[in-house]
Image (spheres, grey):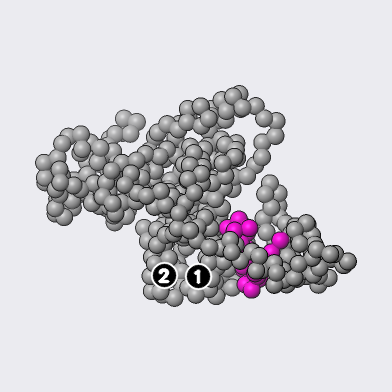
Amino acid sequence: MTNLSEKFLSNLIQRGYNYVDSGFCVWADWKQEMSLFLHASNNDLLDLSETDINDIIQFVWNQSYTIEKKVKKISEWAFVKNQETKYQKEMRNSIDRLFKAIENYRKSEFFEELLKFSAQFKLLAPYNAMMVKTQMPSARYVLTAANWEKKYDRKPKRNARPLVILRKYGPVDYVFEIGDTEPIEKSLFAMSEEQILELIADPYSTTGKIDRKDYHALVQSLSYYGIALEKFRVASSFGAQILKTPCKVNIKGIEAKGHYVISINDKSSLGTAFASICHELGHFFCYHLTAPKKGKDDWWTWRRLSWEQKEFEAEIVSFIICERYGVGNRSWEYLSQVLGKTGSIPEGISIDRIFKAANEVERMLNEDLDPRTCLLYFNDKDFKKRYDMAYPKNEIPIDFEK
C-alpha cells in the first residue's frame, strides 16, 4: 500500500469509525462513503491510484478502534452496530396511507407534479402544500377563510370543500381553493379569480442566486440542532458531507456539545454551498444517520435505507427548498434519471418524511428562529438549563416534529 503519514492514516481510521457510527454499517455502503472521501481528497501530494484507494479502504476496514476501553476492528464495530439496530420500516402515518390509496402519486409523472407544486406554492409550508395537492390535485391557490376575507374580500361558497392542513402550534386548520370562494356581498374591493391568479403568478420565478441573508440564517441555525459547519479544500466535485462526530457548537454565546459536522467545500459558490447544505440536512431530517443517544431517550429512530434511497430522499429535500427560494440547481436532472428508470419513485421512500424534512429545513431559514423550538434544546438537558438561565422566557412554543 502507498506510504501515507501516520497522522493521515489515524484520521482515516477515525473517519472510518465515524461512518459506522453514522449508520453506514454494511461494507458496500461504508466503502462507498470512504471512496467518495478519498477521491475528493486526492491531489498532487497524495497522487493515489485507483488500486491505492481500494487498498487503503480495505486496510482501514480491518484496523482496530477503541471505544470505552473496548477494542474492535472497524468491520467488527460495523457488525455490532448493524445487530444493535433492528430494521423496522417506518410506520406510515395518515398521509403516507393516503398516498398508498392514491397510487398515482407514486408514479413518476404525478410525483413530479407534486414536487413542482410544493416547490412553487410558497404561501404554504412544503408539508401543507403536499397535503393540499393530495386532497385536491387541481388546486391553484388556497387560503383560510379569514385570509380570503382579509386579503381579497372573498368568502367560501356554501358548498365549498375545506382542505385540511397542519396549523403551527396546534392540530389542524382548513383552507379553501380559489374556485370554492366568491366575493363578499356588497364588497367594493373583491377581486375576480383571474385577477388574483394573475397577481400571484410572478413570485414563482427563479433567480438562480441565494440571498446572503437566507444563507447566513441557515448556517446560524445549524448549531440549534447540534450541527457544526466546517470548510475544507478538496476537489471541486465534492459538495458537502454530514457525519456524526463529537464537536462544539455556539448558540447565542452558549457553548454546547454538538453531535454532527457538515463539511463543505470552500471552493463552492454561495448557491452551491446552500444547495449542498440543504442536501445534507435532508439526510439529517430524514433520519439517515443514527441519533446521538440510544434507548428510550433516543432522539429519533434511525431509518436504515440503501445509499441510493438516502440520496434520493436528500436530493428531493434540497430540490424543494432551492426551488422555493429561487436557487438554480441541477437536482432535477438527477431526479429525472432515477424516476425515468422505473416510472415510479423507488421502493422504501417515505414521501411523508421527505416533506417533513423540507419543512424543518425551511424553518431554519427564519432569522428569528427560536432555539427553544429546535432539536438540541429538547434533548440536551444541560444546554436547556443554561439557555433558560441566560434567556428567561415564560412561554416556550413547541414546534419541533420529532
Instruction: Left or right? Give the position of 243 relative to 400.
Output: left
Q: Is residue 130 magenta?
A: yes
Q: How far from the left and from the top, in percent, is residue 1?
A: 11, 46
Mark 1 sits on what residue? 112
Disc 1 packing (10 Å; few <14; some 14–19; many ≥20): some
In which quarter of the view is residue 397 placed?
Answer: top right
Q: How far from the left and from the top, in percent, is residue 71?
A: 27, 35
- For image coordinates 69% across by 72% down, the residue present is 194
- For image coordinates 70% across by 69% down, the residue present is 195
Q: Which mark is residue 336?
A: 2
- For image coordinates 79% across by 65% down, the residue present is 190
Q: Say whether marks 1 and 2 touch (CB < 8 Å).
A: yes
Q: What residue type is labelled 1?
A: Glu
In which quarter of the view is residue 184 placed?
Answer: bottom right
Secondary structure beneath dot 1 equals helix
Q: Residue 140 carries which label?
A: none
Marks 1 and 2 sit apart, C-alpha to C-alpha, by: 9 Å
Which residues fall within the magenta stretch?
122-143
